[in-house]
Image (spheres, rainbow, N blue to C red):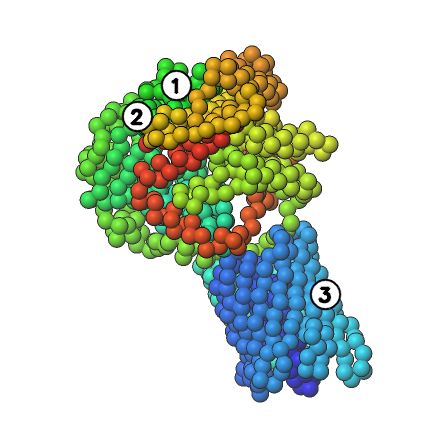
Amino acid sequence: MKKLLFGLVLFGCTIGASAQLVPPASVSTTDDIFSIDRNPAGLAINDGIQFGFSGNIENGIADRYGLYLGGGQDNNISGLGMRYNGTNYTYTYGSGAKIVRGSYFGFSLDFGEMMAPQYNLGLTVRPTRFISLGGTADNITENNGGRTSYTAGLALRPFGNRFTIAADAVYRYDFTSDEYTADARAFLSTELVNGLALNGYYDNTTETVGIGVGFNLPHHKVEAVSDVSGDGWIQDGIAAYRYSASSMRTVVDPVKEDKFVLLTLDGPIIEEKMRSGLFSVTPGRTLTNFILQMERYSRRKDIAGIVLYIKNVSTGPAKLKEMRDAIDRFRDTGKKVYVYMDEGGNLQYYLASVADKVFMNPAGSLWLTGLSMQQIYIKGLLDKIGVKAEFVHVGEYKSAGDMFTEDSTTEANALQLNAYLDDVYDMFTSGMAESRGMSQREIQSVIDQGPFTPSGAREAGLVDSLIYHDELKKMITEENGNDEYELMSETRYNRRGEWHYNWETPLSEKIAVVYAVGQITTGKSQRSPLTGTVTMGSETISNAIRKARKDKTVKAILLRIDSPGGSGLASDIIWREIHLTVTGDNPKPVIVSMSDLAASGGYYIAMNADTIIADPATITGSIGVIAGTFSMDDLFDKAGVNMDVFKRGEHSNFFSVSDSMTTEEREKLYSLINDFYQDFIGKVADGRGMTTAQVDSLGRGRIYSGEGGKDAGFVDEVGGLKRALEITKEKIGVASDEDVALEFYPKYSVDFLQMFNGTDIMAKRLEAYPALQKALREMDRATLLSNQEALYLLPYMLEVR
């Protein structure tokens, strides 16, 4: 037996090491830090930091022992083990990662002073919640005179995660008989009482029967196992201790709601993280991650509440409404929400008002003054420098070029702006009134008195207490009458977790979430090196939709749109992919979720979806077309610039910057874009079950809020991403509370040509100059307007403030 033990340790066989120094477990069920020795794939199953100590007890003395340490996040875990066999030390580095949901891969490297490095592989696959499969191949390079050994394991849970039976088949080389032999092991584990586990095992090689007992505290586990017959492979027994950052079931100290998580909201809230280089990722917190984070926190038993530190959070009103709704759902579970602000404006306070209590810095200020939109017109400036904007549009509301062609807001434009602002202000004030226990009329009256000093905000009922940031912990204690609450940053808390007792299995239904974000252009999606804004490339988005359509595991597509529109051609290319998805040989449901913007081209790509969901504050509609250019002949005259033109063809000089359009050319351009418009409203009519006359009467370039869009028939339901996901599940026959895999598109690859482009640095610096950043964005927009093509473009870049 001792000879066999020495050989197994020397050759670094995973099964041999585990059999001697860590509690026995099947390669199909191992999921803790001791997986370094059993099956490295098991490392990937539970996140967070883990530490383990295990010793072989013989005659009351731990003459052989092992130390293990590891950790990681997102199912990508690494660890290191050190073992002492009574004579020599050996070491193992192991790493495990999730391949796909329910499947994990791992490898380990054994090394020591008396052995050459040995390599081991592991795999765990869980096709259902009741079956787990595992396998290892140890010493695959056959170093140190050893041979590769193989282990395959099968585990079953016929009665849930409280009772597990498993069996391993071990195929290894027997040097005595000079041939491979097959051995078997069986395991039984049960935890009928929280935190108290009883285990049994059998090894047919030595005909050994053993039993074990484990006892859990929230983050600590002690375990002891011992033979009950024969001179077995565990001999007198093994004692083990394990620490885990993830909380476990326990009978002694049940999980308490004693933690408040501090979330700092500072910077933009964006739709997707886009990578344009190795060190260049779109900055900001994504809305999707925030919503999912709130759902996770609402299910965590140790969280009593959250504290939102709202700093310079910036985003549109529709995204803020979705964040507010996510926080409200968190509160519905009975947990508390507190908000702390140094200072804030209209939209920041709209988000803050959903909390149970709002705290503010005594030296801050609250700029709650109501909502406004500003339109800038630079026709007079262009006239002075000799630049003439020449635009033709279909629809009296289609005013994308008004900034350059008008001196003030047109009557039609003012009508749609006021209608939109009315809807958003109603959403804004009704939400705050309900949260603060006022009537809508009362909150509107309070807003008319703004801005506020901190004391004025408290007297008006907008703020509950004036405190400094370092007094948050004390305030939480006073509010809840308990000094045992712990205030943790989200980064620190997210390192913790709950132990995964259920076997995570591949989800049978998968939904593709496709982000369609930014101004629509032909080609690939890009990000501005100055402003950080994203453009939606028709090639990128159409490829993403096509891949999701052809993926047989994808049952539906959720198209998340945040776009003011853009190129008519690019919009139609994306529309075609949606059309093929919903009408092809194997159609799949497409559900659209509209964010802040889904107007003109942003609506065009949505109009033939099965269901369209818009936020109350979404800007949508704008069904119209515009085209034009800028003529600089007067500027050239003033600057003394002369341009000679040689042409063939009557209209070959169309859109020339040196000549204004003739009446005939304007008529031809109008006829051209009117054809685009007729195609636009025809496709809307087909997609929405309306007549072209109905679409035309409601279109004409007019924008709508989400509520207005629903009344007009352009939107099916008012709601956010959460509601859109519920509807998508309904379409594929999945219950709303059932898990479903989300596959996110587009999948951006690293662009090594731009890996040192400094995009984030420049965009970050420009955040300190919002007026300059806004001007640069308008320049990007003006470039699109001068592209000499038909545009499905929002009339302007609206900013509600």
Sequence-first tag of 1 and 2: 2
User: The residue under label 3 is which amino acid type?
Assistant: Ala
Q: CA distance from mark 1 to mark 2?
A: 25 Å
Q: Nearer the viewer, residue 273 or 463?
A: 273
- The residue to which callout 2 is attached is 384
**Horizontal and vertical percent position of residue 719:** 48, 30
Instruction: State which mark lies toward you, 1 or 2.
Output: 2
**Horizontal and vertical percent position of residue 620:** 47, 26
Secondary structure at numbered mark 3: strand
Q: Does residue 478 sit above or below 779 in this rendering?
A: below
Q: CA distance from mark 3 to mark 1?
A: 71 Å
Q: Residues within 10 Å of mark 2 (few under 14, many from 20)?
A: few
Quadrant (top left, top right, bottom left, bottom right) of the N terminus: bottom right
Question: What residue is shown at x 37% (from left), y 45% (from top)?
Answer: 267
Q: Which mark is residue 512?
A: none
- The residue to which callout 3 is attached is 152
User: The residue under label 1 is which amino acid type?
Assistant: Asn
**Horizontal and vertical percent position of residue 306:** 37, 47
